[in-house]
Image: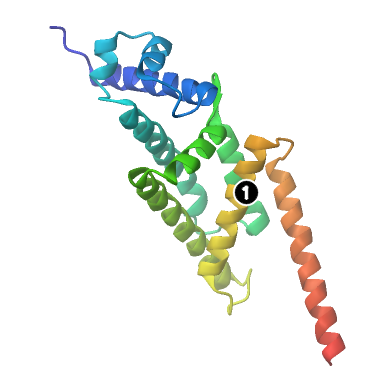
Amino acid sequence: MPIISNEKRDARRTQILNAARRCFLREGLHATTMPDVIQASGLSTGAVYSYFKNKEDIIQAALKTSMVELSDLLQPILHTDSPLPPGGLLCQIMEAIVRFSARDGFDLKRLALLGWSEAQRNARLRSSMGTFYIAFRNDLAGVAKEWQRTGIIDSSADPEDIGKALLALVLGFVVQAAIIGEVEPETISRGLHWACRASESGLKGSEAKDG
């Protein structure tokens, strides 16, 4: 029996996962069958089952692999001694997501929506996704603390609140891009800038009125 190198094994695994992703986006998670994935992969039935025992394993692997790869891509953006201000940071994160999610034959942003839906009924998947998003949110809160240290934001702000708000904006961008389209990272950055300015103006006007 021929020995397969680690590189070849990894390539075949990716081949199967990408075939599954195309099937999921075309047919949906539940309508897609193992024969669909096998046919789309171009591999034999035995080869596919030697990597994944069932469709559940493929769903878990497809989403978890994407989350790990995206996390690795975002780490240099989130862990730096001189983080960009909020608008610039969000723009950089979203641009990275756009580059990462565009694949040959499918878009990972749309797959993320399928994963979020499936996580509502799949405790194992919900746990995996929750771990990823909590870590992401904590990283964003860490950036907020650095903004406080350098005077970009008020020292009285709660970094955890800021982390939650920034994550909401990132996830909202993914939803808009996947369903509606016509939204760019720069759009969100500009919108955040003007929303913050409007908020500051409102606070100043309220303080002047109270005074």
Q: Where 155 sits versus 130, above or below? A: below
> 70 or 182: which is nearer to us?
182
Residue 154 location, x and y as percent? 63, 75
Residue at image location 60% in from the left, 42% down from the top: 174
Residue at image location 45% in from the left, 29% down from the top: 29
Q: How many marks?
A: 1
Q: Where 63 sits versus 80, above or below? A: above
Residue at image location 67% in from the left, 55% down from the top: 87
> 121 or 78: which is nearer to us?
121
The residue that label 1 is drawn on is 172
> 109 or 38: which is nearer to us?
38
Residue neighbourhood size for the residue with mark 1, other residues' Cα within 10 Å, grouped as few (<14), some (14–19), many (≥20)? few
In what element is the residue under mark 1?
A: helix
Where, quadrant-wise, is the C terminus in this rendering?
bottom right
Q: Where 123 sits versus 211, above or below? A: above
Residue 118 location, x and y as percent? 45, 40
**The furthest residue to the left:** 1
Residue 79 location, x and y as percent? 47, 54
Q: Horizontally, is 37 left or right of 210 in the view?
A: left
| Residue 95 picture quarter | top right
Q: Horizontally, is 99 left or right of 59 in the view?
A: right
Where, quadrant-wise, is the N terminus in this rendering?
top left
Q: Horizontally, is 211 left or right of 80 in the view?
A: right
Q: What colour scheme was applied to this rendering of the protein?
A: rainbow
Q: Horizontally, is 184 left or right of 156 in the view?
A: right
| Three-letter code for the amino acid on which mark 1 is drawn | Gly
Q: Where 96 sits versus 147, above or below? A: above
Residue at image location 85% in from the left, 86% down from the top: 208
